[in-house]
Amino acid sequence: MSSNHFLIIGGTSGIGAALSRQLTEQGHSVTTLSRRSDADFSIPGTSHLQADVTNPQTNLPEISLPINGLVYCPGSITLKPFRSLKADDFTNDFQINLLGAVRCIQQYLPRLLETYNPSIVLFSTVAVQSGMAFHASVSAAKGAVEGFGKALAAELAPKVRVNVIAPSLTATPMAEKLTNSEAKLKASEERHPLKRIGQPEEIASMAKYLLSPEAEWITGQVFHIDGGMSSLK
């Protein structure tokens, strides 16, 4: 397998870190970009750039290498009753989930276009299709990600593939407050037909596939990796 170069936004924890490890284990080079400093983590085989991509006032760093695939992992889990949501909640969720991705893709698209059949992978949530109480803000933002991903896939075809992964609850640091007790974890597991929550490596494996040559005929899709929650009762 030839070695490629991948840019993982938010590649230092959770699903992004799992994906970074899987790609480097295959011999690929990975650049991670996040708010964390180099001292905060160590993933062998990766290089790291520090920037807050969700802050529109922050300049994104230049990358000199061609990019075979870009994965945007930053997200949020804002769970509040609608009557408690403020305009800032919606603004923050859109900034993190959608506008950060837009900024990164605009910045690094020229590097993607330097490679053969490059791939962009974005992340949504099972709540967009299923409709869940207290998810109004994050579902609005992630629904926008799905619409953006499909429109971008149409516009960039046939040069660049764009797909979206919509997971359910996954055991990541971001979801810890929803699983930090035995009772909470058990309740979350029982909501899924497969009676457990997802693992970062499982979601990362789907992203790795979408970046690979095996997925060269796949674009404009939303993949529900959610333990059956979106389609089974």
Image: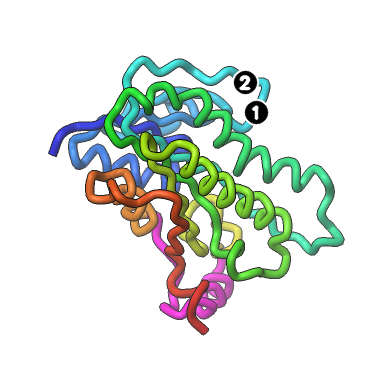
Q: Is residue 12 visible?
A: no
Q: Is residue 220 left or right of residue 82?
A: left
Q: Which mark is residue 113?
A: none
Kindly indicate whether the residue at mark 1 contacts the one at mark 2 (C-beta within 8 angstroms): yes
* Residue 231 sits above or below residue 54 on the image: below
* Residue 82 sits above or below residue 220 on the image: below
Give the quarter of the image for residue 212.
Answer: top left
Pick the quarter of the image with the N terminus: top left
Q: Amino acid at mark 2?
A: Thr
Give the quarter of the image for residue 100.
Answer: top right
Q: Is residue 78 left or right of residue 71?
A: right
**Identity of the residue drawn at 56% across and 68% down:** 181
Q: Which mark is residue 55?
A: 1
Q: Which residue extends farthest right?
A: 83
**Identity of the residue drawn at 69% across and 61% down:** 135
Q: 207 or 153, which lies in front?
A: 153
Q: Residues within 10 Å of mark 2 (few under 14, many from 20)?
A: few
Q: What range is drawn magenta here? A: 181-200
Q: Residues within 10 Å of mark 1 (few under 14, many from 20)?
A: some
Pinpoint residue 153: horizontal percent, then vertical percent.
46, 43
Q: Amino acid at mark 1?
A: Asn
Q: Is residue 197 magenta?
A: yes
Pinpoint residue 161: horizontal percent, then vertical percent.
38, 42
For disc 2, the marked residue is: 58
**Identity of the residue drawn at 44% across and 55% down:** 221
**Identity of the residue drawn at 47% across and 57% down:** 222
Pinpoint residue 138: horizontal percent, then vertical percent.
66, 54
For label 1, the SS is loop
For label 2, the SS is loop
Give the quarter of the image for residue 178.
Answer: bottom right
Q: Is residue 227 visible?
A: yes
